């Protein structure tokens, strides 16, 4: 994929084997259905095969092009299912890392709180705009480094951090707006060792 290699079967096989797994994971996080993720990943590579002149020679640029193509396919999929509701299955990756738990009572309460937060996130996330969803998923679920994501988007690093901050704020507002009433937190349970 470097230089001016001919766009033949060997070129495509290299492109496919180097990037299929990463693209499939990226799409699966967004779609949450293994079969559809596989179909959209295949469609991404079908686009590369049918339009080889559009795929950059540089491997990093080629991956950026493949990600953009995959994002467009995911966007079109989301639009087609938006009338029926969108279920995001991997929202845990958008939450803060697990907290260190010191006793069982706190651990149980934290698990309950985390499950409630996940439920709130599941209700709010599909209501977030496409660009915000894609930005948060790219950064948190895909784990793209900020510098790489900024390059992919063609923006400065400071602008990326501002966009991430605004997207998180919008998500928090939606989570508060679409939160189901919760039972008040029960006092911590004391567990004694025998």
Image: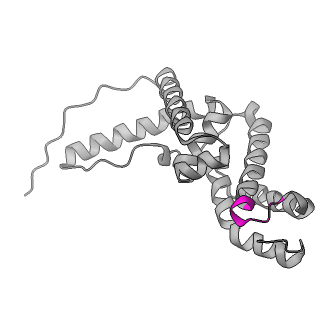
> Relative to 38, is 72 above or below?
above
Give the quarter of the image for residue 3: bottom right
Res. 172 in view: yes
| Image location (x, y in percent) of residue 114 | 38, 41
Which of 155/177 is in front? 155
| Image location (x, y in percent) of residue 152 | 66, 49
Which of 146/115 is in front? 146
Taking the magenta stretch, the answer to whether it contains residue 93 is: no
> Relative to 28, is 20 above or below?
below
Query: How many numbered circles are shown?
Result: 0
Give the quarter of the figure containing the N terminus.
Answer: bottom right
Res. 87 in view: no
Q: What is the residue that sits farthest to the top in this orientation?
A: 177
Give the quarter of the figure containing the C terminus.
Answer: bottom left
> Relative to 67, is 12 above or below?
below
Residue under the image location 44 percent in, 43 percent down: 95
Taking the magenta stretch, the answer to whether it contains residue 60 is: yes
* Left or right: where 31 falls relative to 91: right
* Left or right: where 176 falls relative to 106: right
Residue under the image location 74 percent in, 39 percent down: 78
| Image location (x, y in percent) of residue 46 | 86, 61
| Image location (x, y in percent) of residue 51 | 91, 59
The span shown in magenta is: 55-62
């Amino acid at each position: 994929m470097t230089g001016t290699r001919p766009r033949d079967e060997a070129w495509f096989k290299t492109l496919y084997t180097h990037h299929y797994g990463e693209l499939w994971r990226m799409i699966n996080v967004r779609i949450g259905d293994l079969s559809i993720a596989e179909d959209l990943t295949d469609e991404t590579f079908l686009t590369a095969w049918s339009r080889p002149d559009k795929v950059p020679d540089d491997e990093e640029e080629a991956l950026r092009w493949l990600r953009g193509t995959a994002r467009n396919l995911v966007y079109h999929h989301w639009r087609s299912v938006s009338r029926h509701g969108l279920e995001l299955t991997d929202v845990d990756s958008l939450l803060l890392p697990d907290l260190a738990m010191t006793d069982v009572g706190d651990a149980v309460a934290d698990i309950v709180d985390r499950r409630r937060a996940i439920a709130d996130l599941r209700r709010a996330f599909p209501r977030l705009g496409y660009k915000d969803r894609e930005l948060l998923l790219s950064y948190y679920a895909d784990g793209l480094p900020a510098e790489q994501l900024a390059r992919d988007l063609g923006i400065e690093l400071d602008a990326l951090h501002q966009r991430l901050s605004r997207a998180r704020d919008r998500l928090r507002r939606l989570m508060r707006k679409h939160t189901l009433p919760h039972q008040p937190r029960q006092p911590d349970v004391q567990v004694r060792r025998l």
